[in-house]
Amino acid sequence: MKNFFTSVKFKVLVFLLVLMAGFLAYAGANGRWSAAPQELLATALVPFQRLGRMISGGIEAMYERTVAIDEVLAENEALKEELNRLRREMVDYDDMKAENELFRAYYNIRDTYSDYELVTAFVIGRDPLEKYYSFTIDRGSRDGVAVDDVVISPEGVVGRVASVSYNYAEVLTLLDPAVSMGAAVGRTRDIGLAEGESMLAQETRLKMSYLPREARVAAGDLVVTTGLGGVFPSGLVVGTVEDMLPESSGKSMYAVINPAADVRTITSVFIITDYEPDTVFSASAAEDTAAEESAGTVPEDTAQQTVPAGEEE
Amino acid sequence: MTHDINRRRLLVTARWLCYALLLAVCYMLQTNRVLFDLGGIRPLWLPAACLVLAMWEDAFPSVLYGMFAGLLWDVSSNRLAGFFAICMMVCCFFCSSITQLVLRRTVFNTCMLTLGCLFLVTGLDFLFSYVLFSLPQSGIYYVGTLIPTIVYTVVACVPLYPLCSLMHRIGRTEN
């Protein structure tokens, strides 16, 4: 063993250790998580991750067909009952149509998506130690994906791209405190900042801060992005309000939001690689609120609902 | 004679390739959300594999494979490049040295060494990722997620032990 410490092999190991420390320092000093050897390894391992996803997909399907068949049948019955209930509610067609016309400008994902350039991607890796359910996707710079591109699912916002390599990218979910977006409650038009919060993330919830104390937000209200900040386009569904609680300062309120997209189990996503910026809630909300103010229907202190400067992403 | 030497070299190369393939498969298992999931807790296959490997091989190859496994782990997690690589290099060197000098190669010793090394590595990660940032309820995360992950990983060492033992015998002449 003593001879080992004087051998060439030991010197090579020390050199490699110093090299790793150098990569660590370089990555940290340049504000990046990854360095060249890491990216090369990851690029080479993407096929393995795809293979793993295929295998786990097959096992999951087999599990659902055999072991979880009772749950599947029960879910099927529950969905049938809900479908019948929804059909009964469709009887009042005229009222529903009018309400739908009003909501379409803010919530219609299909109309909004038609203006976006989308890239589909599969989730190919998740780390067991990851607290906020961040994941790796099988699209990278060769597919047009860039850092800060928004990641969505048919249900709503999933997160944003944190780092990109040639054929893979890392995505931070909206539960991560590093991800924040301008958001608005669709029904009341109260504007706030939706961001991840470590305590709420354990229950897969996020926080919408800076709501005024007089906000008339209620549980079940839909929350959408405003487009303020320039990263997240407007009109994307963030989630639904679960609870309204006062901030510790007592000066404002915050809402606990149940995200629309299930970031824990999601297996495929869309990345918005390009879109026409449009802040739905900036001009129209200000105009409508001003009109209501002059008619004396809105208290003055709710007229100015803006996200505090420096708090947007 | 030359034929035997060439055959032996081929087998030795095959052994190293088997180890590399084992680490690649462990990377695939570690990053897969569904396989071996128990209530949201999944084992850390990469450190388990390279620590078991280190108990069977000399210090030099152990540290190299530890570096490889650590870089793979860095890739799959949102950690700074090289963090887990450095941790695994040190842990693999320690495991390999102590096995050659003091410990016998048994499943129990493997599990204990893995337990100790994982507590050290995940403890450092917890310190730099959560404690230093004073994130609330970090203690609950440590007790509710990290410790079960460590225990599950130690259990995952058990099937890896005979696998590495088998690979270790490839290309070695019997005395």
Image (cartoon, rainbow, N blue to C red):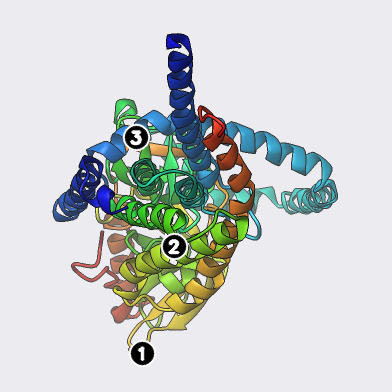
Label 3 vs label 2: CA separation?
A: 24 Å
Q: Along the horizontal axis of the image, is A260 left or right of A291?
A: right
Label 2 vs label 1: CA separation?
A: 46 Å
Between B105 and A23, the one lying in front of the other is B105
Q: Along the horizontal axis of the image, is B76 left or right of B114?
A: left
Both labels 1 and 3 in a single chain: yes
The answer to whether one can see residue A27 in this image is yes
What residue is rendered at 55% in x and 46% in y? Answer: A266
Both labels 3 and 2 in a single chain: no
In which chain is the residue bearing label 2? B
Badge 1: how crowded within 10 Å, few (<14), some, or many (20+)?
few
Instruction: Kindly identify which numbered label has been placed on residue A124.
Output: none
- Return the residue at label 1: A250
- Return the residue at label 2: B117
**Amino acid at dot 1:** Gly
Q: Secondary structure at mark 3?
A: helix
- Return the residue at label 3: A41
The answer to whether one can see residue B34 in this image is no
**Amino acid at dot 3:** Leu
Between A229 and A125, the one lying in front of the other is A125
Q: Height in image: B101 above or below A111?
A: below
